Image (cartoon, grey):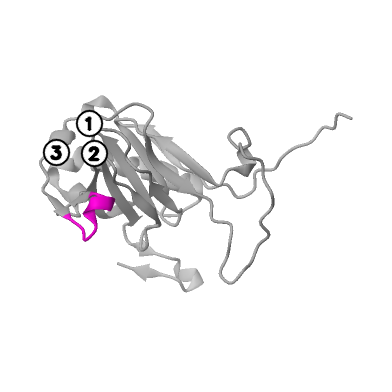
Amino acid sequence: MQVNYQMLELFPTPVYTTTLPVKYSKVISFLDQQDMGEDSDHDNYGYRSKDSYILDKPECGDLAEFILDSTKVYADQLGYDYNEYRFGQSWISVKAPGQHHTMHTHPNGLISGVFYYGPIAEKTPAIKFHKIITGVNVSYIQPKTVNNKKDLKYAQVEFSILFEPGLLLLFPSYLHHSVPVNKTDKHRQSLAFNIVPKLGFGDERNLTELIF
């Protein structure tokens, strides 16, 4: 029997995507000039710039303005009531062949983002978002599921976005994400950042105000 029904998409997590206009590409030469540091496990996790405030530099002024304008559009759709935003830290991340980054979030940020640039093999996963369905001290049933969930939107627990030079992503800082292993012979380059309201968090009426 054919039944008419509707699937309500309750509480989705939006991720903002856009492509940086070509006129901003001149900043890439500045990004390529940055000195890279090494973390304790750089063989696995890759390299990040010694400077972790890249977007505060004058050379990145146009790019920073574009990102903050995009952030305002995104944040307004989320219902955030702030007039202006500013960057926390911003850093270059380079993943050589074989390198990756484990699942994580970005504490002390409201919105986080990544800008991808540089050459890389086509159809290479750049970032993977994860659906976390457990709570603190809460158990859950693990049902039997089909092997191929590719075409089942509501069964997805992971979602990968492919690398594209000029791609800009914005997402809630609490959203779990990881960086898949770079299986190409090229370096995967990106500029990551955190964003906060310019004047502070919270709301005076709700006694949660935190002024910077």
Report if the CB atoms under discs 2 and 1 are less than 8 Å apart: yes
Check disc 2 and report the residue beneath it: 63
Residue 142 placement (x, y as % from top left): 66, 56
Residue 151 vertical position relative to residue 169 in the rendered view, above or below: above
Question: Residue visible at 89% across and 30% down?
Answer: 1
Q: Nearer the viewer, residue 97 or 165?
A: 97
Q: What separation in Å lies between label 1 and label 3 (alpha carbons)?
A: 14 Å
Residue 110 in magenta stretch: no
Residue flagged by tag 3: what amino acid is it? Answer: Asp
Classify mark 3: helix, strand or loop: helix
Residue 6 placement (x, y as % from top left): 75, 37
Residue flagged by tag 2: what amino acid is it? Answer: Leu
Check disc 1 and report the residue beneath it: 24
Question: Residue visible at 42% across and 47% down?
Answer: 171
Q: Quadrant of residue 31?
A: top left
Classify mark 1: helix, strand or loop: helix
Residue flagged by tag 1: what amino acid is it? Answer: Tyr
Which segment did they paint magenta? 38-46
Question: Residue visible at 10% across and 41% down?
Answer: 33
Residue 102 placement (x, y as % from top left): 37, 54
Give the numbered dot on residue 32.
Answer: 3
**Left or right side of 147 for 120:** left
Q: Residue furthest bottom?
A: 207
Residue 42 in magenta stretch: yes
> Counting other residues with Cα less than 10 Å from the Cα at mark 2, is it few (<14), some (14-19), or many (20 or more)?
many
Question: Residue visible at 55% across and 47% down?
Answer: 157
Residue 23 vertical position relative to residue 50 in the rendered view, above or below: above
